Amino acid sequence: MRNTNTDRKWIGLIALLLIAEVLWLLVDLQWIDVPFFFKKSQSSQMSEAGYIISSKKDLKRRGANSLIWEDTQAKDTLFYHDSVLTLSQSSAKLYLRDQTDLELSENTLVTLEEPEDKTKSEIRLRFSRGDLRARNPSFNTSVVGEDWVINLDKGSDIMLRKDQGSYEFEVVSGAATLHTQNGDESLTQDKILKLNDDHKVEKVEKSTELQWKEKKPIRIYTLEENAKIPLEWSGDARGLVINKAGSDEKNQTISDSKQTSQVQLTQGSYKIRLKNASGLSEARTVEVWKAPHIYLKKPLPRDRLKTNEPYEFIWTTDKGIKTYRVQFSSKASPLKQESADQNFTTMKFDQEQDLKWQVQGEDEEGFLIPALYNNEIYLRDEPLQAPKLKLPDVKKAPASTPGASYKSKWHWIYAAVFSEAFAKNDNYEINFAWESVTGADQYILEVSSTPDFRDPELIKNLTQTSYIWKNVKYKKYFWRVAAGSAKGRMGLFSEPMELQLDEIKVIEAPIAPAQAEAEPVPAPTVMPEAITAITKIEPVAEPTNITITLPEIPSGWGLALAPSMKYSKTKGEKETQIDLQGPVPMGFQISFNSGWIDQRNYRFNFWTSQQTWKPMPVTEFPFQDNLKIRESILTFDRGHINEKNRFGFILHENFISKRQTQESLTVQSEILLGLRTSRLFNPNENWQNTLGLSLLTSGKVHELMFDGQSKLYLSNRESKFKWSIGLGANANYQKQKSGGGLQSDLIFLLGLERF
């Protein structure tokens, strides 16, 4: 029989060991404060090596007896055998024992080593990777690498950098000696030493004629993946040597006699040098950092404010920003700027105007942080009052529609298991309602899935005090309403109301009863005689090959004036709609015909038009600018001598609508590419007709296009140049995620062709 008491003893011992190990780890992480244990061991085993003067963002420290990297900050004490690590967009300044200053760039790792002879005032650094600068005005300093040591003389200032597979050493002032397994090399201010993977030391002379106009480090904050860095120098430079921390060296040529350049760099830390036949210049430090995002919280986009009243402007904070610049711009007035140490300020304006406001930042060293975006606000003397919102009614869409219903037995199991998921994917109808405002004859309703209203999912201009929004998905919404008048008077927006569908009583819509399943009808019985009669096969004649010979199509090219009549009625994102009807006088067409080449014919046709459209009537769209719209169609197809059908490609430059402000929209060019098939009808020397069908897409917009053209030549066949008149048309159905519609053009052609 098994001894259960022994098993219990072993289990208890293992549990105690596990608890002790967890406690030791928590003590080491300082998550549990045990003063008599931690401080005693620290003071008895570690000696202070210095402290942190300043740090930027993520600075990490790891003790000699620890496996965990801890966050550290300015004024924290450093001990011998500590490792210090800067991460991306991080930097630090350290003060070490006996006046050694150490500057660490991003992604740099050093270890503070205790000197072998403690009677001497020396500091030893083990450099693993990155970019650092060390100086000591009073004592010698040593920096140790994997297989090298560099000794700095008293008062020397040195820069070290490690690339993918090499080290670079440069003395800013003083002198140093590099010790490698191949011997010693002296390092002075007139040269740069590079230590490669093969342990060979390369000497590069410094050029005194190449000088940077500004030697201070550059730090650029960017909202993109890269940034353009302006550089200016004196001297005859032939190239730039660009070294990014942790990457290979890159060279960029410079034109003759040029002393300025713009370099496009990705995010990271760089050393950039000028180069010519006599050597390299001093390194210029350039940092390209990702800009922290400053989000505007109040006022919201398109808010209306009353003049001569104070309003708070509030935005988000970031620990990397020391001060903020609140900027206001207007078409009618110059830029206005206010500085703020906190994430808010109070402003008052004394005249009506439309403003845009944004917030920039400055870091601790004064480098500029760009604004993420701006918000448009409207200042009015006597705005209409904000409407009072009512609690919306939410109605769930019917679960089934009239008609036959056929469901497998597994459907009910799925519905029971995934009922919550099904409910959240159902569509809803929301009835928004509010109280009327005196003096208002129209209202602006905005619905957003985020409280900042930067990208509303619904914007409606309404004349009534309610609106039913259909096909609504299950999620959180915020909505608000502002009053207005047809004469252009604006009103204040109501405070946004949060709408949680799961917190509102949902009215179930009646479900239409499903029709009963019809009884199956038995198949008719077929007699054997009928089967024999049906399956009797008649002999089939052998097919005859017929060759279709098309009339001669000579090669040539043509130009034509192509004014048109346009009709377009499409819907775009954010409830935008464009309705265009009218003439487009500016248009032309270019065509090319290859003639027969190896029994094949190639045709190329390009048509383009451009027109500026004005909103009508102007009184209904006081904030809408004119729309300048260009449309182009490029077709290329190929036909065989034995075929009337042709196949090819089509490219369509079309336009889609986008909301610009609350009461205005703009258009954006959209390039679609697709396949096309066409057919020639009755081609002869004086009359040609073509019909085509195309399918196009740009990824987010899709089109089905029909096109046709009929052309009549007015000159005889013997003439090389022929005048022509014709009529063309294209019509397409456009489909996009947030809308679509119909577009058509009737084109009048007057051209000249050369054969």
Image (cartoon, helix red, strand yellow):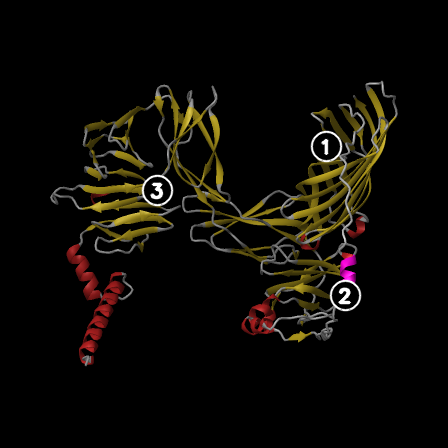
Q: Quadrant of the C terminus?
A: top right
Tell me which residue sits at (36%, 51%) in the image: 58
Residue 529 in magenta stretch: yes
| Chain-order first, disc 3 or disc 2 | 3
- In the image, what residue type sits under mark 1? Gly
Find out whether the residues at labels 2 and 1 contact each other: C-beta distance under 8 Å.
no
| Chain-order first, disc 3 or disc 1 | 3
Left or right position of 596 against 425 = right
3 or 2: mark nearer the eye: 2
- In the image, what residue type sits under mark 3? Ser
Q: CA distance from mark 3 to mark 1?
A: 65 Å
Where is mark 1, residue-wise?
A: 639
At which x and y percent is residue 121? Answer: 16, 42
Q: How many marks?
A: 3
- Residue 126 appears in which quarter of the rendering? top left
**Which range of residues does the magenta coloring cover?**
528-533
Q: Is residue 266 visible?
A: yes
* Relative height, residue 118 to residue 300 (above, below): above
Q: CA distance from mark 3 to mark 2?
A: 92 Å
Secondary structure category for the residue under label 1: strand
Where is mark 3, residue-wise?
A: 105
